[in-house]
Image: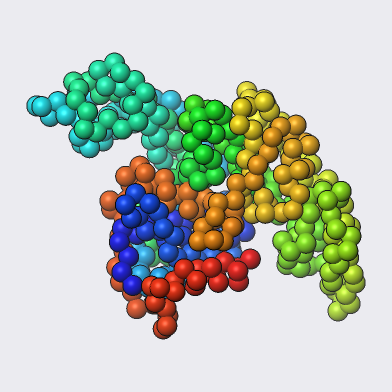
Amino acid sequence: MTIQNPVVSLDIGTSAIRVVIGEAKNGTIHIVGVGSAPSRGIKNGAIVDIEQTVLSIEEAVNKAEQMVGIQIESVFVGINGNHIQLTASHGVVAVGNPDKEITEEDVERVINAAKVISIPPERAIIDVIPQQYVVDGLDGIQDPRGMLGVRLEVNATIVTGSKTILHNIRRCVEKAGLQVAHFVLASMAAGTIALKKDERELGAILIDLGAGGANIAIFEKGALVRTAVIPVGGNYLTHDIAYGLKTEMENAELIKVKHGCALVSLADEEEVFKVNRLGTKKEYDLNQEELAMIIEPRLQEIMQLILKEINKLGYSNDITAGFFFTGGVANMKGIAELAEIELDAPVQISMPNYLGVKDSTFTTGVGIIKYATEQGLIRNHKYKPSSKLPSGVQADNLVQKIKDWFKDFL
């Protein structure tokens, strides 16, 4: 099949590495391929073994390539973590055209002017997020291209991160045979998918609750203003289940995903499943209510840690649009109800619908594609036709192939 303007994202998570291939058509993003592999060499969101991480990236990329039939050469890589810092900046340039029409070149120059800030030598600029442009004193402009003016300004947020962490991620990507097209702040990207424009404008707190921890992103007046990370996530639930049920971690993870419930009061005692006891071949029965007794206390602790961090950042739980949860743990039954109790605020689960399949674990991956497209970052994105397309895969049944993949994955 022929794909026009493909955009590929790479989301390196604690439990899984996910690759999403999108196609930009007439300003709309279509998801045409996905690939996922268990994370190896990743602990709490940080790379601890480069070679193992490379193998996981290669596996996820190969699966996505086989689904679509193209060879990926460059990827947009999501970045998160406590090493991320946001800094306000301002850039000013004179419009270059003699006729005073603002061009793409003028926008690039003013963005580069905003990058001229003093940062410590151990940090590097990841991205520049324009908040608004100002043309001859007229502010609130989102896209100045085509306007007439003499002076162009931008108010922007500079995203910086640890050079060491960025170097290790880039090294893994390059050892997997790929190029880093651009680093993208994952929480910003997720916000473009998980939150509506009005929610970002009024004020919203997005919590990406995954295996390695909770990534917190606070939006106000349409802009990302603060980020933070709580290093306690779904893996702690898995560990608690393994310890409480005396079963292997792999079994505990499967039990959590298939039968987990965040609130004992919402659990179904008639939902009974088998548990393999560690060190023996014996099985015993357990119901969802008993499992929820293990899960609920840990989730209560995680919610309180989130609330404490938000208060530390200078925000309270009365932010207008409330809390929005996404990520793997957000798929669990009862998570919204428990979060509303613990956070004492409105809570919604952001579970975007891609190709008719709902799965919040891919929010960041799709968000990266949307963000890269909207920000005009896709010009240097490369791909070429591949012989990896499995026999029998045609363009007209590709959507069904992706749906089947999601079902198998979940």
Q: Residue at x 81, y 58 (%)?
A: 241
Quarter of image, res 119 = top left
Q: Quadrant of the N terminus?
A: bottom left
Residue pictured at 86% horizontal, 67% vertical: 272
Toward the viewer: 348 or 56? 348
| Front residue of 392 and 14 | 392
Q: Give x and y (percent) for residue 266.
A: 83, 51
**Closer to us: 368 or 230:** 368
Q: Position of residue 209 (x, y in %)?
A: 65, 47
Rendered position, 272 above or below 234: below
Does residue 107 appear in this view? yes
Question: Residue at image x 79%, y 46%?
Answer: 298
Q: Residue at x 60, y 71 (%)?
A: 408
Q: How was this image coloured?
A: rainbow
Left or right: 99 in relation to 325: left
Q: Nearer the viewer, residue 294 or 174?
A: 294
